[in-house]
Amino acid sequence: MNKNSVWMITGCSTGFGRELAKATIEAGYNVVVTARSLNSIMDLVSGHTDNVLAMELDVTKPDQIKKTVSATMENFGRIDVLVNNAGVGYFSSIEEAVEEETRKMFEINFWGLMHMTNAVLPSMRRQRSGHVINISSIGGLASFPGVGYYNGSKYAVEGISESLAQEVAPFNIRVTLIEPSNFRTDWSGRSAVKTKSAIKEYEDLIAPFINGENHGKEPGDPQKAAEAIISMAESKEPPLRLLLGSDAYHLVVNKYTESLKNFETWKGVSVNADFQD
């Protein structure tokens, strides 16, 4: 990837999006930074008007997506990397979740991501190159109490990204899922919706998630995460999945080790479900 490459990043006002925007700009790439509030990202453009374009973008609004992609093509002529970072958290027991709120989260975390991707793919197919980077979560590979609907939105992103990777591979377009564990972003703070527990039996189980007891103490460094994402994107063979954070690595390895043991334990029942010759 050369320094004339064009990155488009959603959700640049805080967290991973902002750190990645700063890092790609510093690296000298052409960068399209976006956020729902244009004022929250204008500082990123200062001193970089030749290679940075700031756009107001709510990924749930098709007209804004179309406008952003058109402006990018007009200014830079291509899109090489799309980073689907915009997203929100949702904290609640599954039984107590508010459907209207969870549907809104899916509109952002899943449908917004896919609308952005589908808007960018035609230009990537024409140029026969590109990289779609979807910011998923460790919660897209392993589930936790108190964030079940958030897990569901990220599992959906995981599943569709796997299919997409196979569909676009013939056009030399790569797809990578980024799966962070706990990082010091605003994911569990201002960017999250929280439904207080009214069912006593759930209080102790989900209280740590609802109250954000670990907020501000997370081990993950967003700046290092941004550097890791750029390094991955610059590699000749970017992976389908990139775990970020030691917690993510150990949790996933332990989960799949246990899953393999379970599959072997029940292998006889599994294979005997076929027609027998």
Image: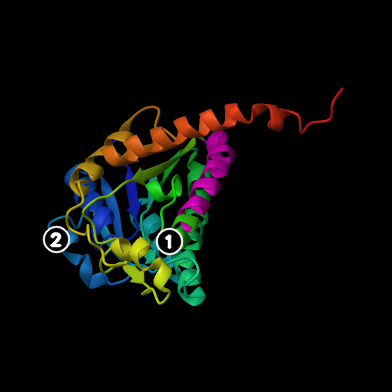
Are there few (<14), some (14-19), or many (20+) residues within 10 Å of tag 1? some
**Is residue 168 a member of the stretch shown in magenta?**
yes
What secondary structure is found at the residue carrying circle 2? loop
| Residue farthest toward the right in the current orientation of the protein | 277
Contact flag, marks 2 and 1 (Cβ < 8 Å): no
Q: What residue type is labelled 2?
A: Ser
What secondary structure is found at the residue carrying circle 1? helix
Residue 189 in view, yes or no:
yes
| Residue farthest toward the top in the current orientation of the protein | 277
Residue 1 in view, yes or no:
no
- In the picture, the quarter occupied by the N terminus is top left
Across and down, in percent, residue 272 comes to 76, 29
| Relative depth, front residue between 263 and 234 | 263
Instruction: State the residue at coordinates (54%, 35%).
Output: 169
Q: Which mark is residue 70?
A: 1
185 lies left or right of 5: left
| Relative depth, front residue between 47 and 117 | 117
Across and down, in percent, residue 243 comes to 35, 38
Instruction: State the residue at coordinates (44%, 49%).
Output: 140
Chain-order first, disc 2 or disc 1 = 2
Across and down, in percent, residue 59 comes to 42, 65
Q: Which mark is residue 3?
A: none
Report the residue marked by disc 2.
Answer: 46
- Residue 206 drawn above or below residue 180: below
Q: What residue type is labelled 1?
A: Ser
Q: Give the range drawn in magenta.
A: 153-171
